[in-house]
Image (cartoon, rainbow, N blue to C red):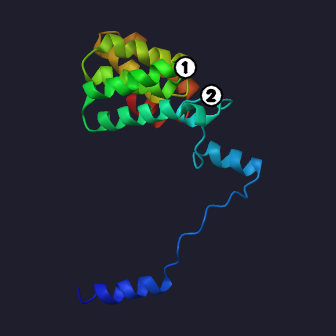
């Protein structure tokens, strides 16, 4: 406590209030930062970039609600919001992946594999879908198919840590 007090005073003396984000980035800078993952894009969340994100707030809310429930280990309860998100946007690869993951964690491997495969078909960049699908195939005694899935996934996602670690 004796050292913390003076340190707090020093921090307050030099701390600046947070500045407002700048929108002064040009299109090229935005594209480069987005490619590096520094800027969120609708496509990064599984949404068609040609659609207005405001039109998908219901899907986003349901997706995040399901993700939170799943992160708490409440997979059965997560299915409801994720299924509503899927019904509202059946082409959303992020929704498909999280729905598949809930089914996998609930022990319903067949349904999980169907959703993982659909997520991959919608967006081959969902690298964890490739990895999880391969693991399920391996567990089902289909090692050749699992290896092929990992190879295909790595071709679609050459820098994917998840796919290299699953190999």
Residue positioned 26% across, 24% down in the render: 76
Q: Separation of disc 2 and disc 1 at Cα?
A: 9 Å
Choose top left, top right, bottom left or bottom right for residue 4.
Answer: bottom left
| Quarter-of-image position of residue 145 | top left
Residue depicted at x 53% and y 77%? 16
Report the front residue among 122 and 153.
Answer: 122
Residue 37: x, y in percent? 57, 45
Whether label 2 touches label 1, CB < 8 Å:
yes
Residue indicated by mark 2: 48
Quarter of the image that includes the C terminus: top left
Q: Where 33 falls versus 83 (above or below)?
A: below
Numbered label attached to residue 54:
none
Mark 2 residue crowding within 10 angstroms, few (<14) / some (14–19) / many (20+): some
Residue highlighted by disc 1 = 91
> Relative to residue 50, is residue 57 drawn left or right?
left
Q: Position of residue 114 (x, y in %)?
A: 41, 12
């Amino acid at each position: 406590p004796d050292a913390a007090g003076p340190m707090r005073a020093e921090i307050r003396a030099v701390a600046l209030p947070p500045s407002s984000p700048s929108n002064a980035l040009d299109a090229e800078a935005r594209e480069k930062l987005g490619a590096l993952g520094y800027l969120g894009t609708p496509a990064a969340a599984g949404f068609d970039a040609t659609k207005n994100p405001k039109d998908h707030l219901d899907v986003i809310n349901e997706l995040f609600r399901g993700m939170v429930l799943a992160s708490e280990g409440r997979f059965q309860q997560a299915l409801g919001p994720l299924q509503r998100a899927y019904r509202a946007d059946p082409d959303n690869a992020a929704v498909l992946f999280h729905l598949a993951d809930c089914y996998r964690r609930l022990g319903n491997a067949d349904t999980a594999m169907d959703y993982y495969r659909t997520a991959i078909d919608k967006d081959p960049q969902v690298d964890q879908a490739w990895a999880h699908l391969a693991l399920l195939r391996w567990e089902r005694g289909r090692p050749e198919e699992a290896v092929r899935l990992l190879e295909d996934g790595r071709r679609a996602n050459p820098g994917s840590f998840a796919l290299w670690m699953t190999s």
